[in-house]
Amino acid sequence: MNQASPTIEEQLRAAITGMTRTERQLATHSSRNYPVAALGSISLRWHARPRWPTPTVVRLVQKLGFRGYPDFQSSVRSEVEDMPSSPLAKHDRAGQAGRPIPIF
C-alpha cells in the first residue's frame, strides 16, 4: 500500500460531508468497525441492517471512488494485509494517526 494515499477509513471521514444521512450512518458504522464491517459480503455485512439497503452501500463506495463493492472490498483486503500485526506496531500506528491510544 502506498503510504501517500489515504486509507479507506480516512476516505470515509473525508467524504462524509457530501453524503446523505443514511450514507453518513453507514460511513460512521464502517469507520467504527473498520475493517471488520467491510470484509463480509455485501448482503451479510451491510444489507442485514434495514436502514442500509444494498443500493446505499453501492452508492457510498462509488462516492469513495470505487467501481463497486468488489473493488472496495479488494482495497480493504489490501489494507488489512498491510496492517501491522504486532501489538507494538498497532500502538505506534494509532499514535501516528492522531487517535487516542487506549489505556488498559
Image (cartoon, rainbow, N blue to C red):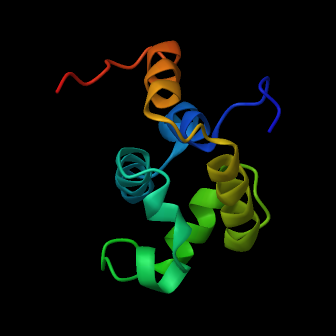
Q: Is residue 83 above or below residue 51?
A: above
Q: Is residue 99 left or right of residue 65?
A: left
Q: Nearer the viewer, residue 97 or 72?
A: 97
Please provide percent x and percent y for residue 34: 45, 50
Q: Nearer the viewer, residue 61 or 22?
A: 61
Q: Is residue 68 left or right of residue 55?
A: right
Please provide percent x and percent y for residue 5: 77, 30
Q: Residue at x 54, y 67 (%)?
A: 39
Q: Nearer the viewer, residue 22 or 70?
A: 70
Q: Quadrant of the N terminus?
A: top right
Q: Is residue 87 above or below residue 78?
A: above
Let me know if residue 62 appears in the view: no
Q: Say which quarter of the image contains residue 49.
A: bottom left
Please provide percent x and percent y for residue 89: 53, 27
Let me know if residue 64 appears in the view: yes
Q: Say which quarter of the image contains residue 14.
A: top right
- Residue at the limit of the structure toward the left, as seen here: 104
Q: Quadrant of the C terminus?
A: top left
Q: Say which quarter of the image contains residue 62.
A: bottom right
Q: Nearer the viewer, residue 102 or 14?
A: 102
